[in-house]
Amino acid sequence: MDLEPIVRRVKEEFHEMPGLRLTPAQATRLWGLEQETCRAVIESLVAAAFLRWTPTGAVTRAEG
């Protein structure tokens, strides 16, 4: 599966909604993805330093 279009869409949503914080379960529902796909997208964006994990287990946009 090509994740690039999904990654672009997720990045756009985080750009449009500053301060957005989502748990993996919330992200799965919001984006209509399967758990494994959603986790892969999140991990890709964390590895690229676009997202970061919060202490509560949610992801939010990395600052800087």
Image: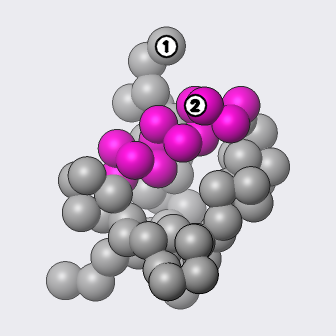
Q: State how many labels appear.
A: 2
Residue 38 can be seen, yes or no: yes
Assign the magenta stretch its main secondary structure: helix
The foreground one among 38 and 57 is: 57
Amino acid type at image mark 1: Met
Q: Horizontal placement of 4 versus 19: left or right?
A: left
The span from disc 1 to disc 2 (Cα, nearest Å) is 9 Å
| Residue 7 at x, y percent in the picture | 44, 41
Corner quadrant of residue 21: bottom right
Say if 54 sits above or below 1 in the image: below
Say if 19 sits above or below 24 in the image: below
The kind of secondary structure element at disc 1 is loop
How packed mark 2 is, by other alpha carbons closer than 10 Å (few <14, some 14-19, many 20 or more), is some
| Residue 53 at x, y percent in the picture | 44, 71
Q: Dividing the image into 4 quarters, which one contains the C terminus?
A: bottom left
The foreground one among 31 and 55 is: 55
Residue 16 can be seen, yes or no: no
Give the residue displayed 44% in from the left and 27% down from the top: 3
The kind of secondary structure element at disc 2 is helix
Give the residue displayed 34% in from the left and 44% down from the top: 44
Q: Horizontal placement of 22 versus 54: left or right?
A: right
User: Mark 1 — residue?
Assistant: 1
| Residue 58 at x, y percent in the picture | 58, 72
Give the magenta part as a residue range: 34-45
Q: Are marks 1 and 2 in contact (CB under 8 Å)?
A: yes
Amino acid type at image mark 2: Thr
Give the residue displayed 57% in from the left and 72% down from the top: 57
User: Mark 2 — residue?
Assistant: 37
How packed mark 1 is, by other alpha carbons closer than 10 Å (few <14, some 14-19, many 20 or more), is few
Give the residue displayed 24% in from the left and 63% down from the top: 49
